[in-house]
Amino acid sequence: MRVLVYKRTHPGDPNADGVFGCEDCMGAVRRRRFDAIIGVGGISAEPRGWGIDQRLNWVGVGARYSESIPVGYRGPLVTFDRFVLLEERGPKLETIAPALARYVYGVHRRVVMSDSLSPAIQREVRRVLSLASRVRRCGPLTQLPTKQRCAPRPCSPRDRRPHDRCRERANQRVRRKTC
């Protein structure tokens, strides 16, 4: 199973419905072929401002790609058979996968494919993916979301701390059903 592990800077993509790419984040990376994704918070000021830094943010298993790339997007939309959105409620990555945390945060790595990882780190990746096995299946993507139907864009990366209204929107998305 090919697993994409990447560092996030903000919440909102994937949205609470499990659609990865609704805000066109990680556009070209979404074109890569993978079976699952582990999204972890980065370490810069923006993820710290959102409270997602160095945390397990989301897990998606059983990737399903949209048949076409929506107009204006850089990659396909991706949904998952199983999806867990944790955002700022997620555990610190170092507590559940210490070797993976050292690998991801020890050097400036934004995106990692699991087939390049050591067997010990791959075991930790499988353990993290098992969190998604405890959730029910998400429905298939029957209609492509539009940017109007997706979650609103979070604060600009230029902002060091997100505005209160942006943080409230992110909290509302987290409170919604994850599947």
Image: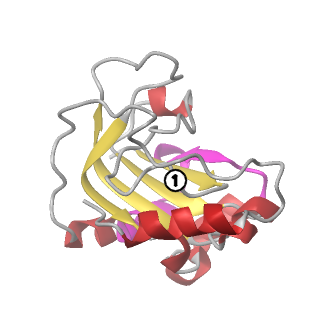
Magenta region: 107-128
Residue at the image point whose x is 56% and y is 27% from the top: 28
Check residue 113 for magenta coloring: yes
Residue at the image point whose x is 81% and y is 63% from the top: 45
Expressed as whole percent of the image width and height from the top left, the position of residue 120 reads 49, 67
Corner quadrant of residue 22: top left
The answer to whether 128 is drawn above or below residue 113 in the figure is: below
Check residue 108 for magenta coloring: yes
The answer to whether 147 is drawn above or below residue 102 in the figure is: above
Give the side of residue 43 with respect to residue 30, left or right.
right
Q: Is residue 124 visible?
A: no
Q: Please give the residue where the numbered disc 1 appears in the rendered image.
A: 12
Give the side of residue 14 with respect to residue 141, left or right.
right
| Colouring rule applied to residues | secondary structure
Residue at the image point whose x is 34% and y is 34% from the top: 145
Expressed as whole percent of the image width and height from the top left, the position of residue 97 reads 52, 74
The answer to whether 173 is drawn above or below residue 112 in the figure is: below
SS at mark 1?
Answer: loop
Residue at the image point whose x is 33% and y is 17% from the top: 68
Give the side of residue 1 with respect to residue 143, left or right.
right
Three-letter amino acid code at the position of disc 1: Gly
Give the side of residue 145 with respect to residue 143, left or right.
right
Q: Please rate how many residues cluster around mark 1, counting C-alpha atoms within 10 Å: few if below 14, some from 14 to 19, many from 20.
A: many
Q: Is residue 79 visible?
A: yes
Q: Which of the two residues, 93 or 79, is positioned nearer the viewer here?
A: 79
Expressed as whole percent of the image width and height from the top left, the position of residue 84 reads 34, 65
Expressed as whole percent of the image width and height from the top left, the position of residue 9 reads 67, 55
